[in-house]
Amino acid sequence: MAKVLNYPSQIQQGEIVQSWHVSQSVEAFSAASQQDYDISVSGSFKVTGSQFIKPDGLLTTGQCQVVTYNPTTGQLFRADTSSIQAASTPGLEVYRTGSSDNNIVPEKFGCNQASANFAVVAGGQCNTASAANVFIGAGINNTASSACSVIGGGSGNFASGVCSFIGGGERNKAGKQGIVVGGVANTASGLCHNIVVGGNDNHAATGLYGVIIGGSTNRACGGAYDFIGMGALNNIKTGTVNATIINGSYNLVNANYGFVGSGQYNSSSCDGAFIGNGFCNINLSTCG
């Protein structure tokens, strides 16, 4: 138990001051005796030197108030912990709670919104996290509107499917478990698991497990497991499965297991039809 300073009543005007009247004060303020004292100070208390607190001397019990510091006047204040989260108290925080206690949205910048449980907007401007467990890292005018979706950054991106992901870029859209890594106006929608890596105006839609690596205005809209590597204006028709276009432009696969390697205006139009390269080739043969 901490000791208290004694003898203050014995120190009187005109009386002799004994050594024991002041020795406790020396012990208390110098820690010479290695004994703890309770010291109370009324009025202001100013310290010009450094201040230290032994780490094991701080209590760890959670409290409803905190100590704040004014660097201009040097004054200390106590404040409710809720004031750290209050939008009406500028300058105290970068992040505050959003529409409930379970989400985070920047306070100092951006007009961002996080309106569902465990939704987070880390930065940027005018971003909206409107479903549970979603995350928007940065950028502007991005929207994550379905559970467990993620937008890393960019502008005008829209993650509307469960567990969808958009890394960045502009005006990209991702449906259920769809992935868009970047680019402009790309769409990974359909049933699920469609992927667009980059480029612009590419669509991996309708089916599942469709992949477009890059290029421009390519369409992998088949039934399942379709792939377009690069190029422009290549098209895998709706309902087609296991179709592949590696590169080129204006190439078409509209039958199952069809393949076009590259070139222009080639058409693989029957099941298992193969075109390696060239111009205006049409393969109507079947794998049988």
Image (spheres, grey):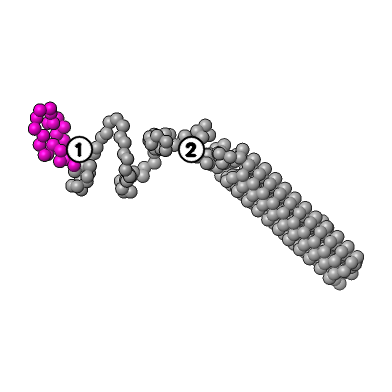
- Report the residue at 29% width, 30% height from top: 43
In the image: residue 119, left or right of residue 43 = right
Instruction: Tell me the quarter of the image containing the C terminus.
Output: bottom right
- Report the residue at 81% width, 68% height from top: 261
Q: Which of 65 and 48 is in front in this view?
A: 48
Q: What element carries label 1?
A: strand
213 magenta-colored: no
Residue 25 position within the rendered picture, expressed as x and y whole percent measured from the top left: 19, 39
In the image: residue 146, left or right of residue 252 = left
Instruction: Tell me the quarter of the image containing the N terminus.
Output: top left
In the image: residue 71, left or right of residue 44 = right
Q: Quadrant of residue 226?
A: bottom right
Residue 222 position within the rendered picture, expressed as x and y whole percent measured from the top left: 79, 58
Q: How crowded is mark 1: few (under 14 residues within 10 Å), some or many (20 or more)?
A: few
Which residues are drawn in magenta? 1-26
Residue 206 position within the rendered picture, expressed as x and y whole percent measured from the top left: 77, 53
Q: Residue furthest top?
A: 13
Q: Is residue 1 in sight in this rendering?
A: no
Q: Quadrant of residue 114?
A: top right
Per the image, the residue denoted by label 1 is: 4
Identity of the amino acid at label 2? Leu
- Report the residue at 67% width, 43% height from top: 141
Q: In this view, does 2 lie above or below 152?
A: above
Residue 225 position within the rendered picture, expressed as x and y whole percent measured from the top left: 75, 62
Q: Nearer the viewer, residue 263 or 187?
A: 263
Q: Residue furthest bottom?
A: 288
Per the image, the residue denoted by label 2 is: 92
